Image: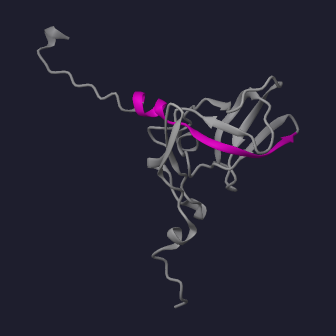
Amino acid sequence: MRDLDCRLLLEPGRVIAGNAGILVTRVIVTKQNGAKNFVVVDAGMNDLIRPSFYGSHHRVQAVTLTRRAVWKADIVGPICESGDFLARDRNMTVVKANELLAIMSAGAYGFVLSSNYNTRARAAEVLVRGNRIKIIRRRERFPELIRGEALQPL
């Protein structure tokens, strides 16, 4: 680069911030429809829009590691939309209701692209340092979601 007679600036951004964050979600139910397996979770496309919006790949893993069988499944959210998915056709350990999944590399564009679509509160943000945690942004509450809306009929 020295021979180019220019100043080179690098912005690591997503490489650092993306991999620094995960989206933790709880399994609501697992379903089978013929040969297709579904893991329905409590996070949705409003929490992490990238897979639905432009097909980004986020590694998915169970928070608690087990020695269960592996299956191929779609990880889908609770919003009744065909685009409400976090991962498709993923080989992963079979999970059960109430277990937690980690959607990896959600840090760069997770919360900043999240929305209140379908009147869903945005997720809390938690900072983890070693064995300490601190809530840095709490989950929104319903009154905050409807603040500013006209509550009286016209």
Q: Residue furthest bottom?
A: 154
Residue found at the far top of this picture: 3
| Residue drawn 86% across the image and 34% down it | 35
Asked if residue 28 is among those painted magenta in the image, a careful observer would answer yes
Q: Residue furthest left?
A: 5
Say how the picture is coloured.
Answer: one colour
Looking at the rendering, which quadrant does residue 141 occupy? bottom right
Q: Indicate the position of residue 145 as horizontal and vertical percent values.
A: 52, 68
Decide which of 6, 115 is in the foreground and name it.
115
Q: Position of residue 98 (x, y in %)?
A: 76, 45
Quarter containing the N terminus: top left
Residue 51 vertical placement versus 111 (above, below): above
Residue 42 position in % (x across, y down): 68, 50
Front residue of 27/150: it is 27
Please report the residue visible at 11 percent of the width from the left and 15 percent of the height from the top. 5
Magenta extent: 15-33
The number of numbered badges drawn on the structure is 0
75 above or below 152?
Answer: above
